[in-house]
Image: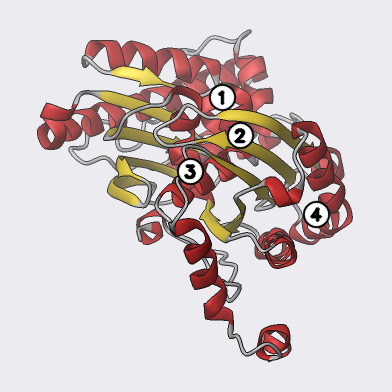
């Protein structure tokens, strides 16, 4: 294959790259690592430089995020082709800004980490190919990061949270409860059987004529509404497991809006948000009790991550729930709950500490379940 030619010319194959990088680092006593992170899985083009070592906290030297919201707003959602094209056009500049802002040269970093999935495959490929080029040019190790794992480990970047902990990961495409035992070590308790919470927020916003992105718009409108005004369903509420479901709730909101009844948009938003909060807290309570049964001697820690974790009403409700169940709760700042490259760089630091690098043969993945991120 053409991409093997530079290695073949010198007697190498792609698999050698990973081994060479390992050897270069294996004999070094490195107390901290500096990693360049690249994130292009959806509609944010991001690069960051982070320094630190597990369990954290780490130092964010730079964290540049270029949002494509205005490009996608006319369509009410992310258009994959537009997103990929935008990544191609601006990623190099974003990386340069991240390195400059951190006052770090490419040759000074210990590794280059990039999202390798899951996500919109075109965007993921742009970031991963760029990371490969930078790694090859600088002789630095390449690390392909599972985007969900990066969210899962953000609390270690921000707070140095010890493992194990219970993770609630809630975003536009995912809603899961997992026990996190370390980088690459996850035990799935429950996941959505249909739609994710973030998707339900976006669809509700669209029904109400609110701008994209829908989550913040619904939250803001809900502040002026009555959460008891509509009798909306609470899917999975009271079930013994830890799974989620939001499709039925989303459908109920659509029927309410299209019914012709004189429902104020503020009341619809507030009622919908309250239903989501009650479902998430009910599912999280089950997760907490299972976590205690499995890790009772290791402490009671809840971490909330993902874009939906930026919702202040949900954050407040989960904090109250954690106190009731005897858990401490850690929720990263909102800017680190949504997609960013600092979390990618931190996940790269966790992998550096484990001397776990990837070869240039690594492929981008549209789908990559978190359980499959275990190494």
Marks 1 and 3: CB-CB under 8 Å?
no
Q: Identify the element where label 1 is drawn.
A: helix
Secondary structure under tag 2 reads loop
Inter-mark Cα distance, 2 to 4: 17 Å
* Mark pair 1, 2: CA separation: 7 Å
Answer with mark 3 or mark 4, whichever residue precedes in sequence.
Answer: 3
Asked if residue 143 lies left or right of residue 231, the reply is: right
Q: How is the image coloured?
A: secondary structure
Q: Secondary structure at mark 4?
A: helix
In the rendered image, the vertical position of residue 44 relative to residue 209, given as above or below: below
- State if disc 2 and disc 1 touch (CB < 8 Å): yes
Mark toward the start of the polypeptide (3 vs 2):
3
For residue 310, which numbered disc appears in the image? 1
Foreground disc of the pair 1, 4 = 4
Give the structural element (helix, strand or loop) at label 3.
Answer: loop
Point 44% across, 28% down: residue: 276
> Residue 182: x and y, percent?
33, 43
Whether residue 372 sits left or right of residue 218 in the image: it is left
For marks 1 and 3 on the same chain, the one whose residue lies earlier in the sequence: 3
In primary-sequence order, the first of circles 1 and 2 is 1
Badge 3 density bin: few <14, some 14–19, many ≥20, Cα 10 Å: few
Local crowd at mark 4 within 10 Å, few (<14), some, or many (≥20)?
many
**Closer to the camera in the image, 266 or 75:** 75
Residue 86 location (% of width, % of height): 84, 53
x%, y% of residue 116? 58, 60
Q: CA distance from mark 3 to mark 4?
A: 33 Å
Residue hosting label 3 = 30
- The x, y position of residue 341, in whole percent, is 65, 41
- Which-is-in-front pick, marks 1 and 3? 3
Q: Which residue is mark 4?
A: 87
């Amino acid at each position: 294959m053409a991409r093997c030619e530079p290695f073949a010319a010198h007697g190498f194959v792609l698999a050698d790259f990973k081994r060479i990088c390992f050897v270069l680092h294996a004999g070094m006593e490195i107390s901290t690592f500096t990693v360049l992170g690249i994130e292009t899985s959806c509609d944010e083009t991001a690069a960051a430089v982070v320094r630190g070592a597990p369990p954290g906290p780490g130092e964010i030297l730079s964290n540049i995020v270029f949002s494509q919201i205005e490009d996608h707003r006319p369509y009410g959602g992310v258009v994959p082709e537009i997103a990929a094209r935008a990544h191609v056009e601006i990623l190099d500049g974003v990386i340069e800004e991240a390195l400059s802002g951190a006052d770090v040269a490419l040759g000074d970093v210990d590794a280059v980490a990039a999202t390798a999935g899951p996500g919109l495959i075109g965007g993921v490929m742009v970031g991963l190919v760029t990371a490969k080029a930078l790694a090859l040019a600088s002789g630095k190790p390449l690390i392909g990061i599972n985007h969900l794992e990066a969210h899962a480990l953000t609390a270690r970047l921000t707070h140095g949270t010890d493992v194990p902990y219970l993770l609630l990961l809630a975003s536009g495409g995912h809603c899961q409860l997992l026990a996190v035992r370390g980088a690459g070590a996850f035990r799935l308790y429950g996941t959505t059987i249909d739609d994710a919470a973030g998707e339900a927020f976006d669809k509700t916003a669209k029904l109400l004529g609110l701008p994209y992105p829908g989550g913040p718009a619904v939250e803001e409108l809900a502040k002026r509404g009555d959460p008891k005004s509509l009798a909306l369903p609470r899917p999975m509420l009271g079930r013994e497991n830890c799974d989620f479901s939001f499709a039925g709730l989303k459908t109920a909101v659509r029927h309410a809006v299209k019914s012709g009844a004189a429902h104020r948009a503020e009341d619809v938003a507030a009622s919908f948000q309250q239903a989501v909060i009650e479902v998430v807290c009910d599912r999280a309570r089950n997760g907490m009790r299972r976590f205690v049964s499995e890790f009772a001697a290791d402490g009671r820690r809840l971490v909330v991550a993902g874009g939906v974790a930026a919702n202040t009403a949900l954050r407040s409700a989960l904090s109250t729930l954690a106190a009731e169940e005897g858990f401490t709760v850690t929720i990263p700042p909102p800017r680190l709950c949504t997609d960013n490259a600092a979390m990618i760089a931190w996940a790269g630091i966790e992998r550096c500490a484990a001397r776990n690098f990837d070869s240039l043969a690594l492929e981008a993945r549209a789908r990559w379940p978190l359980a499959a991120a275990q190494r």
